[in-house]
Image (tube, grey):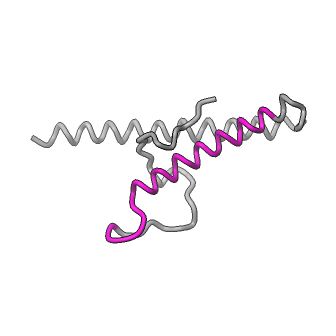
Amino acid sequence: MNFVDPSMNLNVNPAVLPVSTQKASPVGGGSGFADLLGDMVSKVNGMQSEANEALNDVVTGKVTNIHEVSVKMQEAGVAFDLMLGVRNRLMQAFTELSKIQV
């Protein structure tokens, strides 16, 4: 299982990953885009940690419901793949913008 290091500089589109009910404040005050991205990475990392713990519980015999563990692992995998896809798209857009600026 891949784990996300929260200190990594990954760009994530907030519209595609689950977010809390709090809305981001305007540029002038409060939390910024970087905080929002850090929160997204932390949530994906948390999902992967929960899936890993559930898998360990199945292996040690603490949990017998393999279906729930499988669902958690799939959700964590999809969230991670989505985050990487969004990051790659943002990096591609940044590269294109840097080519435009002379």
Stretch of the chain drawn in magenta? 27-56
Residue in the foreground of this view, choosing between 61 and 18: 61
Report the quarter where the C terminus lies.
Answer: top left
User: Is 54 within the magenta?
Assistant: yes
Residue 48, percent across and down? 64, 39
Residue 49, percent across and down? 67, 40
Rendering quarter of residue 69 = top right
Residue in the foreground of this view, choosing between 58 and 80: 58
Residue in the foreground of this view, choosing between 13 and 53: 53
In the depicted structure, whether residue 18 falls above or below residue 75 = below
Rendering quarter of residue 79 = top right
Q: Residue at x 59, y 42 (%)?
A: 45
Report the quarter where the N terminus lies.
Answer: top right
Residue at the extreme front of the image, as rendered:
7
Rendering quarter of residue 44 = top right
Q: Residue at x 57, y 62 (%)?
A: 20
In the depicted structure, whether residue 60 falls above or below residue 35 = above
Residue 90, percent across and down? 36, 42
